[in-house]
Amino acid sequence: MKNKVALITGGAKGIGAAICRELAREGYTLAINYNSSETAAQSLKEELSQFAEVEIFKADVSDSAQVEEMFSAVESTLGEVNLLVNNAGIAQQSLFTDISDDMWQKMLGVNLSGVFYCCRRALKPMVNKKNGKIINVTSMWGEVGASMEVHYSATKAGVIGLTKALAKEVGLSGVTVNAVSPGVIMTDMMASFSEEDKEALKEETPLNRLGEPDDIAGMVSFLASSKADFITGQIISVNGGFVI
């Protein structure tokens, strides 16, 4: 029997790469999406190809035409997508009054429209087969909001609403839709934070450490497994107790 195909958006680095590694160990065939990180995507493909079937696909998920092309390429190369992990995202800190129209639209395009476009396209074969899983990566700031990150928080809150509503709509079709809501995770998105800032965030976290990409990958792996077949519409926080 052919392995299940997992498409991971923004899969080249950080949380996405950790998810790819975890799913490869679980026996999935991987379709790794990237936009600008081609070198990292190619390196990850070489690393994981030793024990999994892996292909990389370039697409800007904020462009519905590119999403359509990506899915068509995945289907012709690897087969229909059984598991979609919407991980692609961007972050930015800015005073609310300094957020330009372009900044707002770019954040919306990648973080929210990208999830919408990928879910819409992935659902067609999933509904036909009455089987499939969608896992969206949101953020604890989508749950409680973050000062200086209003546009980011708004998009991630949108992903939470989309996840819950879509789960209700496609449950009868045998498709589950859940979200993982990370706390402060040590990825490139933390590069602009000073050591003092990171220490302060660590002290605010009850488990007294910052998260690692593997912490998120483990939850995604669980939600993708048969152990989570009766879980849908849930926003599972993985934040060390930062938000309770």
Image (cartoon, rainbow, N blue to C red):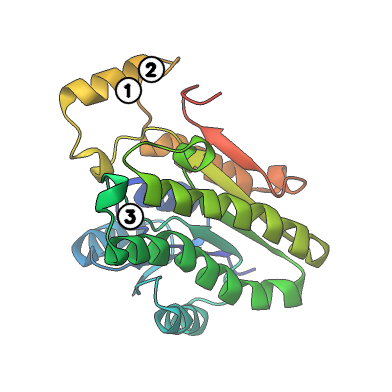
Residue sitting at x 38%, y 39%: 213
- Using the image as rendered, state which of residue 66 and residue 112 is in the foreground: 112
Measure how far apart labels 2 and 3 are at the Cα level.
24 Å
Task: Give the mark nearer the N terminus: 2 vs 3.
Answer: 3
| Residue topped by disc 2 | 204
| Residue topped by disc 1 | 201
Marks 2,3: beta carbons within 8 A: no
| Residue topped by disc 3 | 90
Q: Where residue 204 sits: x, y (%)?
A: 38, 17
Measure how far apart labels 3 and 1 are at the Cα level.
20 Å
Does dot 3 land on a helix, a strand or a loop?
loop
Measure how far apart labels 2 and 1 are at the Cα level.
5 Å
27 up-or-down from 187: above or below: below
Q: Where residue 54 sits: x, y (%)?
A: 40, 66
Residue sitting at x 46%, y 46%: 22
Q: Is residue 232 left or right of residue 6?
A: right
- Using the image as rendered, state which of residue 51 and residue 81 is in the foreground: 81
Does dot 1 land on a helix, a strand or a loop?
helix
Marks 2,1: beta carbons within 8 A: yes
- Using the image as rendered, state which of residue 98 and residue 125 is in the foreground: 98
